[in-house]
């Protein structure tokens, strides 16, 4: 990587202070303490319910002697720099100054059509450009759906634990949450689904757990969603990262089988992205849904950012049209599979006395669950920083912040030997946390 701004070079002072001061659970969860000068208006109250963990681990990633197993970042050395340079050249030649304008709110028409084609091929029914809104990453899709559907105090039924970025996106909407139980047997689940503005799920190699939800569970959830008359937000960034065989049809495809023709009017709102298969810096993602919902989301997007960058959309279009992903994704998958295996082998050697996990069949994360209640991963996080290793504690994936018994560990960003060293450091940190716990003689 060239010297430059990333990651978090301007925040190193902040990181130094994070590392010097042992983090309490409260410090992990409380949002940056920054307040305006005395005498100026206070910050919006929703900020006090947030946390600064994402800022922290973006900053930590910039330090040479630190092993960050925290971020959800791809391997930077696999970013296709040359192919992107050539694609950018082609895009500027193809579109000229038109590509430097504000774009249509819904996105570059040719890319909308290409995404519609991709989703049609994957789901086996026709989706047209009218079913596609291009977004600034899938993250913006989460934000727009929250803004469109949720008023303060309304209910979201969400897979649990829940992707931190989704909780962040919806925090200003001040929703309530109920846990999605994939068995659908939990008491009150049907009533919750009936009240919910939408259900949120990441069925493919979920963030943070890496779980691949079974086809039966997908179909059963769709039945319940249809019966309850709510929306289902299917967030699918990890689809390309399949290590151990195909993921199988998504929930959108399940619905497509039930309604194979005509204008799409199903309950599924599908989010996709090029962040994991090409590069997150492109910031190209999409929402696929019924046309009237897309039109409403476009109104919300208009007041959010006018339009996404046409230039990066044109670049993405070149990459898609040249079929680059088809050659590139197998290379990423092979690298990530090796890294996953290295991480899990090291964890078996150094962490299995204290943690258990399933080897994820895809995605970017291993979800490690403590075997003993004496491990508190918020407290462990502070010790880990002192050992110069970072992970993401489970509390930030819980809308209530109460889940302290697990951690999300990323394996895609670092080489196998770095992952092994990171795991050794995690083992040292775990020993320190157990020795330091209250009530233990020093
Ligand atoms: N949803 C999930 C579940 C994710 O893990 C991520 C990325 N970490 C996103 C959405 C956001 O992706 P993007 O880079 O496309 O904004």
Image: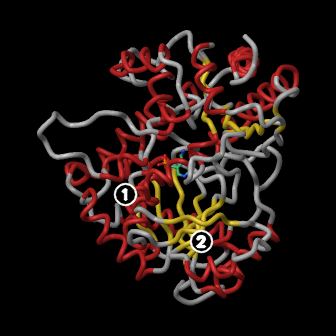
Q: 181 or 58: which is nearer to us?
A: 181
Q: Give the tally of numbered discs.
A: 2
349 shown above or below 29: above
Disc 2 crowd rating (10 Å Cα; few below 14, some 14-19, many 20+) is some
Q: What residue appears at the point 73 percent right and 40 percent down from the top-left corner?
A: 367
Q: Label 1 crowding class (10 Å Cα cut-off): few <14, some 14-19, many 20+?
A: many
- Secondary-structure class at tag 2: helix
Query: N-terminal of the two: label 1 or label 2?
Result: 2
Q: Nearer the viewer, residue 65 or 128?
A: 65
User: Residue visible at 59% across and 70% down?
Assistant: 199
In the visual, does 28 lie left or right of 417? left
Which residue is tagged 2?
120
On screen, residue 167 versus residue 359, left or right, reads left
Which of the numbered marks, if any, corresponds to residue 172? 1
Residue 39 screen position, x and y as percent = 11, 39
Position in image of residue 434 (x %, y %): 75, 22
Q: Residue at x 78, y 37 (%)?
A: 373
> Is residue 344 depicted above or below 87 in this figure?
above
Asked whether the viewer can see residue 140, the reply is: yes
Q: How far apart are marks 1 and 2 (CA)?
A: 34 Å
Front residue (pair 231, 108): 231
Q: In this view, does 124 lie above or below 68?
A: below
Q: Position of residue 281 (x, y in %)?
A: 43, 39
Q: Is mark 1 on a helix, strand or loop?
A: helix
Quarter where residue 419 is shown = top right
Q: Nearer the viewer, mark 1 or mark 2?
A: 1
| 243 sits left or right of 199 in the view | right
| The CB of the residue at mark 1 lies under 8 Å from ligand 1 | no
Colour mapping: secondary structure
Hey, which quadrant is residue 143 in on the image?
A: bottom left
């Amino acid at each position: 990587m060239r010297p430059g701004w990333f990651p978090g070079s301007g925040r190193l002072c902040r990181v130094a202070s994070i590392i010097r001061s042992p983090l309490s659970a409260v410090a992990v969860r409380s949002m940056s303490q920054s307040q305006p000068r005395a005498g100026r208006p206070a910050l919006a109250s929703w900020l006090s319910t947030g946390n600064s963990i994402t800022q922290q681990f973006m900053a930590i990633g910039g330090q040479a002697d630190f092993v960050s197993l925290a971020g959800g970042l791809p391997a930077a050395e696999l970013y296709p720099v040359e192919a992107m340079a050539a694609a950018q050249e082609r895009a500027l030649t193809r579109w000229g100054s038109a590509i430097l304008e504000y774009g249509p709110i819904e996105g570059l028409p040719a890319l909308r059509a290409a995404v519609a084609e991709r989703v049609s091929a994957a789901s086996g029914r026709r989706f047209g450009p009218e079913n596609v809104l291009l977004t600034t990453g899938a993250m913006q899709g989460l934000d727009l759906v929250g803004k469109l559907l949720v008023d303060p105090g309304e209910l979201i039924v969400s897979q649990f634990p829940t992707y931190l970025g989704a909780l962040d996106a919806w925090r200003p909407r001040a929703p309530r949450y109920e846990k999605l139980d994939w068995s659908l047997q939990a008491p009150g689940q049907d009533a919750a689904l009936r009240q919910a503005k939408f259900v949120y799920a990441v069925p493919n190699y979920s963030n943070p757990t890496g779980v691949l939800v079974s086809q039966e569970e997908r179909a059963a959830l769709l039945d319940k969603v249809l019966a309850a008359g709510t929306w289902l937000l299917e967030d699918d960034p990890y689809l390309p990262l399949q290590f151990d065989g195909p993921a199988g049809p998504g929930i959108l495809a399940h619905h497509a089988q039930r309604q194979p023709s005509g204008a799409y009017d199903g309950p599924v709102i599908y989010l996709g992205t090029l962040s994991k298969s090409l590069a997150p810096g492109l910031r190209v993602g999409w929402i696929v849904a019924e046309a009237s919902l897309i039109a409403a989301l476009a109104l919300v997007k208009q007041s959010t950012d006018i339009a996404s960058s046409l230039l990066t959309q044109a670049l993405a279009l070149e990459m898609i049209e040249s079929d680059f992903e088809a050659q590139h994704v197998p290379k990423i998958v092979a690298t990530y599979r090796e890294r996953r295996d290295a991480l899990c082998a090291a964890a078996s050697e150094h962490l299995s006395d204290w943690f258990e996990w399933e080897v994820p069949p895809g995605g970017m994360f291993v979800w490690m669950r403590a075997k003993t209640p004496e491990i508190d991963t918020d407290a462990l996080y502070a010790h880990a920083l002192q050992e110069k290793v970072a992970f993401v504690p489970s509390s930030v994936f819980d809308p209530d912040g109460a889940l302290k018994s697990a951690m999300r560990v990323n394996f895609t960003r670092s080489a196998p030997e770095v992952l092994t060293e990171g795991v050794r450091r995690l083992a040292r940190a775990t020993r320190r946390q157990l020795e330091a716990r209250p009530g233990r003689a020093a």
